[in-house]
């Protein structure tokens, strides 16, 4: 058992992130102690002490991490925010004690590019936060591209996310609350009508919309006519202009039909995401997808013929059972068809997924994922792609990142607006979290009921809540 106690400070969340990185799932006790399961016994104290001998008597000045009674790390407080210093000290101590290092060092937050923007050089990220040199380069490069895209997004504009959390089957690694259509119950028609009601009630908000994202689940799970009815009505209510970026997530190749693509095209959709995740038929079968590599290739070819402005394809590094050679092959084959965007995810594990964390840990090693990502980060720039947004999730193996790559000029503004936390985002549909950003700085959130049945029942209340949140 690993037990961590805080003395002299209350930075529970930052230390929890670091503990999770080293030891997996954690729990916080009523006493304030944080625990992680482990066969070894380890007692850790994160201690913040005042230096009473200095002139600044009121200020705490020494940060230490003590493991099993031995002081492993002591640092003098500097000007960085306390949370980051506490993380850094704990990370350094655990790294020394266990001999383990992680690619992002003590940058356990979900947006390393925010920190990359503050530093002068890659070296600084490496020296201050123990970030590995390839990741520091990636962070700095991505932060620069993000800045360029951000300059194209009007400061007071709104991005809109419309969520359809239904999928044809459930992927074994899925941690998203997506409803499996193969289970037999079909509340989708009622859900779609509820979405349209919400969109209609929120119309006063749609005067300065920069981007719209129809996401999921899989929005293309709707049958052809139903899809066209929904999209036509939704777009007529949203009133996009010629500049508005409209993305349709058509994640599962087996849900894509010519009729849906024609409807998307005629309704002004200009960006399509088709997400094979791997180009290995055996893996697709193992993870519970009903489509094949050939389905993906066929769907991609139809999409290309329709000439959407931008096409994105997702791959996941670390799918159960895959070796780095499988991932490399998927990426090589994908690159041959040159989609405008390629997003490389690291497998994310949450308890809601059908696969347990342990199953994932056993099926693929951190080192193997590292090889996959190193390959992607080398290959894609060589093919003309630039990284333009990047985020981490809290429970990816090895604390790896997800990176959006784009051919120049094809970057997705919605992704950058959403990830930068610098723009307001209106989320429509069950489980969506809206964000309101004040002067590019302060942000407030407004959530929505997660359960689609409850959402259908209380959609008007949800729309009113968001109108109030955005003051309209
Ligand atoms: S397609 Fe995406 S949202 Fe749907 S089940 Fe698979 S991982 Fe989950």
Image: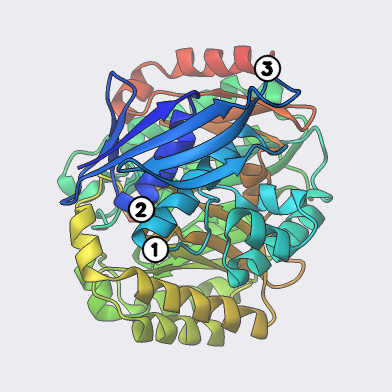
Distance in Å between CA atoms under marks 2 and 1: 8 Å
Q: Which of the two marks, 3 or 1, is nearer to us in this view?
A: 3
Coordinates of residue 412 in the picture (x, y in percent): 67, 57
Where disc 1 sits, the SS reads loop
Which marked residue is nearer to the observer: mark 3 or mark 2? Answer: 3
Question: Considering the image in quadrants, where does the C terminus appear?
Answer: top right
Give the numbered dot on residue 100: 1
Mark 1 Cα shell of 10 Å, populated few (<14), some (14-19), many (≥20): few
- Front residue of 409/43: it is 43
Residue 336 shown left or right of residue 252 in the figure: right
Q: Residues within 10 Å of mark 3 (few under 14, many from 20)?
A: few
Which label number is shown at residue 22?
2
Residue highlighted by disc 3: 58
Q: Badge 2: how crowded within 10 Å, few (<14), some, or many (20+)?
A: some
Query: Residue at 71% across / 59% down in the picture?
Result: 124
Question: Can the viewer see residue 205 in this picture?
Answer: yes
Q: Earlier in the sequence, mark 3 or mark 1?
A: 3
């Amino acid at each position: 058992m690993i037990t961590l106690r805080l003395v002299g400070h209350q930075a529970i969340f930052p230390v929890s992130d670091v503990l999770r990185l080293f030891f997996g799932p954690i729990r916080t006790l009523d006493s304030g102690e944080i625990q992680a399961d482990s066969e070894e016994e380890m007692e850790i104290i994160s201690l913040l002490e005042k230096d009473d001998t200095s002139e600044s008597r009121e200020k705490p000045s020494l940060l230490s991490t003590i493991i099993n009674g031995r002081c492993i790390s002591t640092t003098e407080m500097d000007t960085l925010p306390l949370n980051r210093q506490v993380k850094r000290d704990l990370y350094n101590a655990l790294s020394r004690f266990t001999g383990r290092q992680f690619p992002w060092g003590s940058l356990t937050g979900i947006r390393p590019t925010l920190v990359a923007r503050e530093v002068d050089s890659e070296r600084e990220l490496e020296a201050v936060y123990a970030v590995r040199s390839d990741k520091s380069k990636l962070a700095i490069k991505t932060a620069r591209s993000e800045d360029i895209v951000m300059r194209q997004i009007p400061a007071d504009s709104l991005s809109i996310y419309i969520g359809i959390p239904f999928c044809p089957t459930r992927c074994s690694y899925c941690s998203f609350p997506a409803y499996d259509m193969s289970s037999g119950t079909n509340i989708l028609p009622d859900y779609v009508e509820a979405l349209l009601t919400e969109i209609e009630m929120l119309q006063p908000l749609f005067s300065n919309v920069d981007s719209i994202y129809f996401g999921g689940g899989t929005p293309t799970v709707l049958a052809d006519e139903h899809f066209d009815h929904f999209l036509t009505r939704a777009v007529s209510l949203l009133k996009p202009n010629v500049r508005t970026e409209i993305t349709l997530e058509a994640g599962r190749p087996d849900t894509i039909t010519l009729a849906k693509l024609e409807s998307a095209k005629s309704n002004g959709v200009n960006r399509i995401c088709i997400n094979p995740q791997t180009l290995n038929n055996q893996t697709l079968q193992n993870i519970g997808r009903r489509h094949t590599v050939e389905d993906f290739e066929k769907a991609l070819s139809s999409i290309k013929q329709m000439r959407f402005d931008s096409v994105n394809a997702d791959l996941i590094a670390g799918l159960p059972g895959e070796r780095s050679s499988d991932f490399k092959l998927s990426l090589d084959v994908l690159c041959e068809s040159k989609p405008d965007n390629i997003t490389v995810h690291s497998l994310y594990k949450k308890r809601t997924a059908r696969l347990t964390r342990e199953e994932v840990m056993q099926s693929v090693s951190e080192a193997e994922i590292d090889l996959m990502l190193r390959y992607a980060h080398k290959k894609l720039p060589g093919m003309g792609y630039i990284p333009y947004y990047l985020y981490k999730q809290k429970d990816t193996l090895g604390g790896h990142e997800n990176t959006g790559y784009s051919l120049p000029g094809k970057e997705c503004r919605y992704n950058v607006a959403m990830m930068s936390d610098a723009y307001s985002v209106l989320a429509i549909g069950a489980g969506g979290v809206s964000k309101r950003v004040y002067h590019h700085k302060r942000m407030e959130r407004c959530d929505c009921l997660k359960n689609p049945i409850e959402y259908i029942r209380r959609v008007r209340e949800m729309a009113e809540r968001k109108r109030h949140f955005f003051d309209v």
